Image: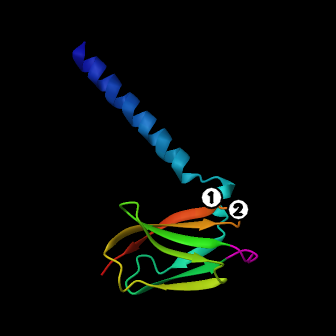
């Protein structure tokens, strides 16, 4: 009886996990349409942010390190912005693009590898 319960539990967990992964593979249309792209990722000496859609002045770009400390902010950024990473430590950083009202229009992460 214990073996049957163990086998049924394993099968059930496998089915649940595969369904969860299947849902993650099928992104919503909102996730596909990005306002800007960044490259290279992972970055070594610089990272570049380019707008994909109609550029609208008034965006603010913030970069936050993995500890939650803001390490960069630029208001009214251009449609193509490069950031020097020479003073950045190796690790993962989060970027936030905010519109003129302060609402986060897009966010994501990039890696600095030195």
Residue 23 in picture, x, y percent from top left: 55, 45
Q: Is 69 a magenta residue?
A: no
Mark linked to residue 16: none
Is 70 left or right of 57, judged from the image as shown?
left
Mark linked to residue 31: 1
Query: For mark 1, does the 10 Å Cα neighbourhood hold few (<14), some (14 to 19), or many (20 or more) residues?
Result: few
Q: Outermost residue toward the top? A: 1
Which corner quadrant holds the C terminus?
Answer: bottom left
Query: What colouring does the structure picture have?
Result: rainbow
Q: Is 56 a magenta residue?
A: yes
Which corner quadrant holds the N terminus?
Answer: top left
The range drawn in magenta is 52-58
In this view, 104 is above or below 6: below
- The majority secondary structure of the magenta stretch comes to loop
Q: Residue at x 73, y 77 (%)?
A: 57
In this view, 12 is above or below 52: above
Residue 77 in picture, x, y percent from top left: 63, 80
Tell which tag, 2 or 1, sits nearer the viewer: 2
Local SS, label 2 = loop
Count up the numbered dots. 2
Residue 92 in picture, x, y percent from top left: 38, 67
Q: Residue at x 40, y 60 (%)?
A: 68
Query: For mark 2, does the 10 Å Cα neighbourhood hold few (<14), some (14 to 19), or many (20 or more) residues?
Result: few
Sequence-wise first label, 2 or 1: 1
The CA span between labels 2 and 1 is 22 Å
Q: Which residue is mark 2?
A: 101
In this view, 88 is above or below 11: below
Q: Nearer the viewer, residue 36 or 8?
A: 36
Q: Nearer the viewer, residue 50 or 32?
A: 50
Q: Residue at x 56, y 63 (%)?
A: 107
Local SS, label 1 = helix
């Amino acid at each position: 009886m214990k073996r049957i319960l163990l086998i049924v539990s394993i099968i059930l967990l496998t089915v649940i996990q595969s369904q969860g992964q299947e849902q993650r593979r099928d992104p919503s249309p909102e996730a596909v349409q990005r306002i800007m792209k960044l490259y290279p990722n992972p970055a070594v000496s610089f990272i570049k942010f380019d707008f994909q859609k109609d550029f609208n002045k008034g965006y603010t770009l913030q970069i936050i390190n993995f500890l939650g400390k803001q390490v960069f902010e630029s208001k009214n950024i251009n449609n193509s912005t490069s950031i020097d990473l020479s003073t950045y430590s190796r690790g993962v950083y989060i970027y936030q693009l905010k519109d003129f009202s302060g609402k986060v229009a897009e966010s994501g992460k990039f890696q600095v590898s030195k």
